[in-house]
Amino acid sequence: MYALKTGNKVGIASPAGFIRGKEDIRLPLEYLEKLGFECVIGSAVYKQERFMAGSDKERAADIMNFFADPEIKAVFTTAGGAGSQRILDLLDYDIIKKNPKPVIGLSDNTSLQNGIFARTGNISYTGFSLKYDFKNGCLDELTDMSLQKILKGEKQTIADGEKINGGEAEGILIGGCLST
């Protein structure tokens, strides 16, 4: 398991849809800082080109800059939307493989997460978005607990839900988004 530590730097990237401005991610950035992380904002985060956060090259450059920087220990994506699959051919998978770190996001960003996993085996965490998970002004308690466990490298157990097939399983779970 991958674990972050207090004081680690984390990259903030917008590989897909754009955000309207700093206010869209102010609360999540404050949250990450309260957890003890230093947020490094990618250069394309606040850009807009049509429905995406800057050009394909700009969004890919942010991802590559974060993977190439040994001080960045994880990459958080700001929002889903559309466009992350467009940057897959612009990434240097050798650099990513030599500098593994989790990509944390959801929605359209699962194409980025799965593309990187397929080429490098790099782990990612699907199910959290800086913009969407704080849209009501705070983070849901279950999401908060789950995210903090993941960031600390702790195992999670799912105890609720309806069983379709009984038993236990262990392995790699690959997330996804139906539109990608």
Image (spheres, rainbow, N blue to C red):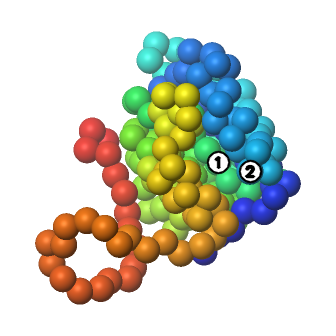
Few, some or many residues within 10 Å of mark 1 (<14, 14–19, 20+): many
Residue 167 coordinates in the image, percent (x, y): 23, 86
Few, some or many residues within 10 Å of mark 2 (<14, 14–19, 20+): some
Residue 29, image quadrant = top right
Residue under the point 32% across and 83% down: 169
Q: Which of the pair 32/140 is nearer the observer?
A: 140
Q: Which of the pair 103/24 is nearer the observer?
A: 24
Query: In the rendered structure, which amino acid carries the disc numbered 1?
Result: Val
Whether residue 162 is visible, yes or no, is: yes
The answer for how far apart the CA atoms under marks 1 and 2 are is: 15 Å
Residue 86 coordinates in the image, percent (x, y): 44, 35
- Residue 75 is marked as 1
- Lateral position of residue 95 relative to residue 122, left or right: right
Residue under the point 31% across and 67% down: 160
Whether residue 60 is visible, yes or no, is: no
Tell me the element at label 2. loop
Q: Name the residue under label 2.
A: 35
Residue under the point 34% across and 52% down: 176
Q: Which of the pair 47/167 is nearer the observer?
A: 167
Q: Is residue 62 above or below residue 1?
A: above
Residue 21 coordinates in the image, percent (x, y): 63, 16
